[in-house]
Structure formats: structure tokens, C-alpha cells
Amino acid sequence: MDQNDFYPEKPIILEKNTQRKTSQMLVSLILFFAVFFVFFSKDFLFVTQLIFVLLIHELGHFLMMKYFNYENVRMLFVPMMGAFVSGKKNQYFQKESLLVVSAGPIPGFLIGVVLLIVSNSYHSAFLVNFSLLFIVLNYINLLPLYPLDGGQFVKIISKRFTDYFTLIFEFISSLIFIGIGWYIDSWLMMIFGFYMGFRVHTIQSVIRIRKELKEEGIAYESNYAELTRKNYAGIRSKLLEKSKTLRKYIDTVEEEEGNQLLAKQVNSILTNALTFNASLLFKAVLLLVWIFILISPFIVYFLFKEDLISHYGWYFQSLSSK
């Protein structure tokens, strides 16, 4: 008899239906618009442009996830923060993951460059502003800071990204966000930095639990679908042992709700190993594209500054006349 037969069946994690995901996205979009509309002195045009740029960026991630058969793919807007797309797979592949994370900022940045070139042909200040929004937001997302796309890219491309490396990387990223927020006097960015610092504390807790699980011979390097009953029971027991809050909450809710919460908590402990299937050439080309975009503003500024001023003088004049 298999020893797993001595353990009860693990719960099946219930996914939200498509209609509910769509309604959540629409509600988050409306809330996002309302908050930014008030924050930016009811500038309808700017907020609409901002949402469109974010939508195009996230649509790149969304479509790429759908192409690679991710499950439970959804898009949400977060007021005063931005937007994100989430999805999951039983098995992650490095090449797919690199394409998914690149599908937002790289096309978005290139769209901005094309719009900037086109804007000069029509002398359209509207198109210049629109293009700069595309360029700036997608450029920021390319920076190697977690959880931006650039930070995700660094994590995926490196084989040495252990739990402790992740901890250090996110801690440094949080300090940089706090520092930038303090320097430019942006309380919003500072709050985001402190939120990242709180995530670091959560990662510390997960690392400690994984360390104890390893010492006790309980395997956590698996996806939820392939997790054995025995290992599920072991991880579940460890979570309840470590969290008084979780134990108290489980005692106050219905059994089904409690089982779903525990299943999701167990799933958060698992490390669904990344299959490193991207060739050296593929990674090198993508890395060069990423680096080139990051340094391109400096190249343009130092080598083509005078040309930009001569070609877009009409735009700078329109700004000074306002």
C-alpha cells in the first residue's frame, strides 16, 4: 500500500470564473480612472492616455500568457500604482517566461518611438505627449528593480536566483524605491518602497518554513497538482504550527472555505521549478535588446541632442508659449 493512502485527499483549488474576472477588471479600471482623475486635477485627456498606455502594456503580457496556455489569466488595475496581469502554469519554461515578461515593455517602448517619429510629420503636440507617456512608462518598467518587468527579467534569466538571492534583490529594490521617492518628493513611491519592504518580511518567513520542511524531509519543490498527499499534509501542518492567526481564522470559517485558504497557503510555499530551456543565443539577443533600450535615451541625448532640438523645435516652442 502507498504511504500516501494514509493521508486524506488534498483540496482542489477552485478558480474564479471568467465572468467574475472580467467584472473585477472593469471595476478596478473604473476605480483607477476615478482616483487618477481626482489626483491629476480632473485632466480627462491625460488619465485616458495613461490608461490606454497601461492597457497596451498589460495586453502584451496577457496575450503572450494566453498563447503559452497559462491558466486563470486576469488583468487588474491598481489605483495610484499601475496594472498587472497574473496567470499560472503547472510547469514554467525559461524561454516562455522571458517572452511573457518582455511582451509588455519592449513593444510599448517601440510604439512610443514610432509615435514620436510620426508626431513630427504632423507637428502634433498631442502625439508627442502620447509617445512620451509610452516611452517613459515602459522604460521605467525595464529597470532591473523588482517587481518591475526588468526585475522579473533578471530573476528569470539567472540560474543562481535562490531564495536568499531573491530576498536580497527585493530588499535592495525596496530601498531604491524609498530613496528615489524621498529624492523626488514622491510619497507614493516611498509607500511602494515600504510595501516592498513588507514583502521582504514575508519572503523571510517563507524561507524559514522551507528550511524546516527540508530538514524534516518534506518535499516542497513541486507544483500543486503533483504534490503528494503526504507532503501536502506536512506543509499544511507546518503552516498551522507557525501561524496563530491562520489557526484562529480557520476555526472561525466554514470547512470548505478553510480548506481553500490552506490549499492556497500551501501553494504559496511551493517552488515550481523553472525549466531552463532558453538557448544561450536567445538569452544573449534578448539581453542585448533590453540593455540597448535602457541606454538608448543616453545615446540619443549625447549624440543627437542638436538634431532633436532642430526637428522638434516647434514642440518646445508650444510648451514655452503655454
Image: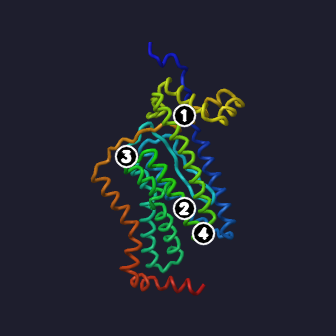
202 w.r.t. 308: above or below: above
At label 3, counting other C-alpha atoms closer than 10 Å, the crowd grade (few under 14, some 14-19, many 20 or more) is some
Residue 188 occupies quadrant: bottom right
Q: Which mark is residue 46?
A: 4
Q: Is residue 306 left or right of residue 15?
A: left
17 w.r.t. 295: above or below: above
Residue 8 occupies quadrant: top right
Q: Amino acid at mark 1?
A: Val
Marks 1,4: beta carbons within 8 A:
no
- For marks 1 and 4, give the one nearer the viewer: 1
Marks 3,4: beta carbons within 8 A:
no
Structural distance between the alpha carbons of marks 3 and 1: 24 Å
Q: Amino acid at mark 4?
A: Phe
Residue bearing the label numbered 1: 266
At label 2, counting other C-alpha atoms closer than 10 Å, the crowd grade (few under 14, some 14-19, many 20 or more) is many
Q: Is residue 110 left or right of residue 251?
A: left
Disc 2, SS: helix
Q: Nearer the viewer, residue 116 or 282?
A: 282
Structural distance between the alpha carbons of marks 2 and 3: 27 Å
| Residue 94 seen in the current view | yes
Name, please, the residue furthest toward the left: 281
Marks 1,2: beta carbons within 8 A:
no
Residue bearing the label numbered 3: 94
Disc 3, SS: helix
* Residue in view at x 59 percent, y 38 percent: 16
Disc 1, SS: helix
Residue bearing the label numbered 2: 177
Quick one: label 2 or label 3, which is nearer the N terminus? 3
Q: Amino acid at mark 2?
A: Phe
